[in-house]
């Protein structure tokens, strides 16, 4: 018997032992399993979670973006952050600088609820949708700092998706990020817009990481603090 024949006979013996006749996982099932694994690996490889690869709104217009936005969903960073009833007003001054004032509920020491105000000023970069944001809380217990502030997408009249990465991993992905989904209407976003927003969340590698934000009027009456 030639060498090729011996190798073929050995392969037949191996596969017969590995996948006996009538077994649940036969040869064809094993081949399809390999194809499926390859397809899954390819899909994961296609999603680039490096922050530098994220797309932002083209030709972003600050003037059109100005006005009141209601936060509908959020992905929190590490640390104390506004929790719900979050309303932000963006404005543009005479020199073209963008500013923001946000108000929302914060819970302190797991029992004290208060309405807090945060202020932000934005410095332009080469990309009109990417800003450097300096922010601080009117109250001392709120965070302050300097973050990147990117407008991922908006139609100016209905929705906006914002993203910030505070800390990069060595591979260029984000170790500490936050993101908001904003709406002009406090009652929420229409279904067709929700589909667009979900796609943007997936592109940020943040799918299923957002929390819905309640708007129940808690901060509308100027509440300074309540124990819950």
Image (spheres, rainbow, N blue to C red):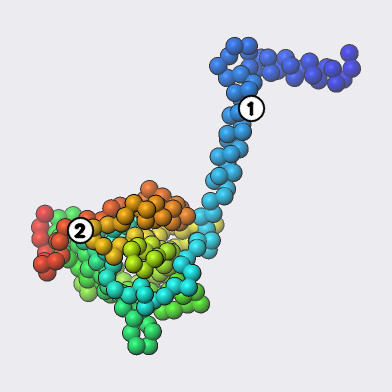
Q: Which residue is mark 1?
A: 31
**Which x, y percent locates residue 122?**
38, 77
**Which x, y percent locates residue 12?**
74, 16
Residue at 24% across, 66% down: 87
The reply to whether residue 140 is in sight is no
Q: Is residue 176 above or below residue 28?
A: below
Marked residue nearer the N-terminal end (1 or 2): 1
Q: Secondary structure at mark 1?
A: helix
The reply to whether residue 16 is in sight is yes
Residue at 47% across, 65% down: 56
Q: Which residue is mark 2?
A: 215
Camera-side residue: 93 or 176?
A: 93
Q: Quadrant of the N terminus?
A: top right
Q: Quadrant of residue 65?
A: bottom left
Residue at 44% across, 72% down: 60
Residue at 66% across, 14% down: 17
**Which x, y percent locates residue 185?**
26, 62
115 left or right of 58 in image: left
* The residue positioned farthest toward the top in the image shown: 21
167 left or right of 86 in image: right
Mark 2 is surrounded, within 10 Å at the Cα level, by few (under 14), some (14 to 19) or many (20 or more) other residues, namely many
Q: Secondary structure at mark 2?
A: loop
Q: Quadrant of the C terminus?
A: bottom left
């Amino acid at each position: 018997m030639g060498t090729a024949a011996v190798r073929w006979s050995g392969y037949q013996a191996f596969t017969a032992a590995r996948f006996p006749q009538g077994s649940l996982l036969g040869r064809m099932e094993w081949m399809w399993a390999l194809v499926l694994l390859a397809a899954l690996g390819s899909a994961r490889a296609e999603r680039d979670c490096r922050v530098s690869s994220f797309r932002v709104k083209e030709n972003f217009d600050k003037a059109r973006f100005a006005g009141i936005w209601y936060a509908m969903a959020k992905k929190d960073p590490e640390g104390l952050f506004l929790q719900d009833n979050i309303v932000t007003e963006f404005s543009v001054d005479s020199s073209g600088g963008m500013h923001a004032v946000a108000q929302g509920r914060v819970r302190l020491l797991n029992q004290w609820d208060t309405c807090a105000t945060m202020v932000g000023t934005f410095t332009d970069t080469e990309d009109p949708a990417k800003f450097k944001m300096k922010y601080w809380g009117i109250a001392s217990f709120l965070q302050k700092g300097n973050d990147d502030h990117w407008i991922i997408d908006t139609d100016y009249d209905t929705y906006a998706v914002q993203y910030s990465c505070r800390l990069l991993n060595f591979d260029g992905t984000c170790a500490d990020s936050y993101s908001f989904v904003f709406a002009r209407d406090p009652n929420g976003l229409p279904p067709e817009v929700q589909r667009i927003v979900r796609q943007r969340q997936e592109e940020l590698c943040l799918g299923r990481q957002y929390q819905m934000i309640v708007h129940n009027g808690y901060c509308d009456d100027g509440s300074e603090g309540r124990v819950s």
